[in-house]
Image (cartoon, rainbow, N blue to C red):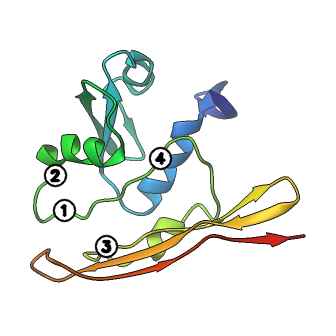
C-alpha cells in the first residue's frame, strides 16, 4: 500500500509502507535487511528486487506456511551472523521519531514501544522487557498490562 512518495530522479513515485520501516532501520545502522515473505508475496520481492536503500542490501527468505512472528524469526536466523545486531520490525506501521531504533542499546534484547492512537483513547501497548545474559541465556522478565487512557 503506498503512503506518501519518494523521488526517483526527477519523478515522484508512490512509497510502500514497508519503505518507511526500511528507512528507519537504515537510520539505525542496518546494512542488511532480511524480508521474511510467504510463498505468494512476490510483490515485496518485485518492489525491492535485490536493490539497495541507503546502502542496505536485501535478502528474501520464504516462510512456507504462516506460523507467526517467532517462526519468521527462526526462518531469518540462518542469514544472521552470531556477531550481528538484529532489528526486528513489522512493516505495516509508521512511527516517529524516525531515529527511534537508534536509541536502543546494541547487544541487548530491547523493544521500541510507542502509544497507539485509537479513536478517543490512547492505548499504551503492553510492556514486556526481556533481558538475556552475555551467553544468550534468558535471565529476567518484567511485564506490565495495557492501560487505556481516556482523553
- Judged by depth in the image, the label closer to the viewer, 1 or 4, is 4
Q: Give the mark, 1 or 4, whose residue is nearer the N terminus.
A: 1
Q: Looking at the rendering, which quadrant does residue 35 occupy? A: top left
For mark 4, what is the residue?
Answer: 90
- Tell me, yes or no, whether the two marked residues, 3 and 1, touch with CB atoms within 8 Å: no
Per the rendering, the mark at residue 109 is 3
Label 3 crowd (10 A; few <14 / some 14-19 / many >=20): some
- Tell me, yes or no, whether the two marked residues, 2 and 1, touch with CB atoms within 8 Å: yes
Q: Give the mark, 4 or 2, whose residue is nearer the N terminus.
A: 2
Secondary structure category for the residue under label 4 = loop
Q: Position of residue 90 (x, y in %)?
A: 47, 47
Label 4 crowd (10 A; few <14 / some 14-19 / many >=20): few
Pick the residue in front: 148 or 69: 148
Secondary structure category for the residue under label 2 = loop
Could you give the CA–CA distance between mark 2 and mark 1, rounded to whole angstroms?
7 Å
Per the rendering, the mark at residue 84 is 1
- Tell me, yes or no, whether the two marked residues, 2 and 3, touch with CB atoms within 8 Å: no
Left or right side of 111 for 115: right
Could you give the CA–CA distance between mark 4 and mark 3, rounded to whole angstroms?
17 Å
Per the rendering, the mark at residue 80 is 2
Say which quadrant the N terminus sits in: top right
Q: Position of residue 33 (x, y in %)?
A: 32, 44
Amino acid at each position: 500500500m503506498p503512503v506518501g512518495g519518494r523521488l526517483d530522479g526527477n519523478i515522484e513515485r508512490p512509497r510502500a509502507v514497508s519503505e518507511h520501516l526500511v528507512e528507519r532501520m537504515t537510520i539505525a545502522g542496518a546494512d542488511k535487511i532480511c524480508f521474511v515473505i510467504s510463498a505468494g508475496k512476490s510483490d515485496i520481492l518485485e518492489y525491492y528486487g535485490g536493490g539497495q536503500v541507503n546502502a542496505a542490501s536485501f535478502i528474501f527468505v520464504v516462510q512456507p506456511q504462516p506460523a507467526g512472528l517467532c517462526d519468521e524469526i527462526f526462518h531469518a536466523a540462518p542469514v544472521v551472523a552470531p556477531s550481528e545486531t538484529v532489528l526486528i520490525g513489522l512493516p505495516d506501521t509508521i512511527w516517529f521519531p524516525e531515529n527511534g531504533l537508534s536509541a536502543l542499546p546494541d547487544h541487548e534484547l530491547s523493544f521500541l514501544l510507542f502509544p497507539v492512537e485509537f479513536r478517543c483513547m490512547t492505548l499504551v501497548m503492553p510492556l514486556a522487557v526481556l533481558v538475556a545474559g552475555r551467553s544468550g541465556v534468558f535471565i529476567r522478565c518484567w511485564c506490565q498490562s495495557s492501560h487505556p487512557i481516556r482523553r
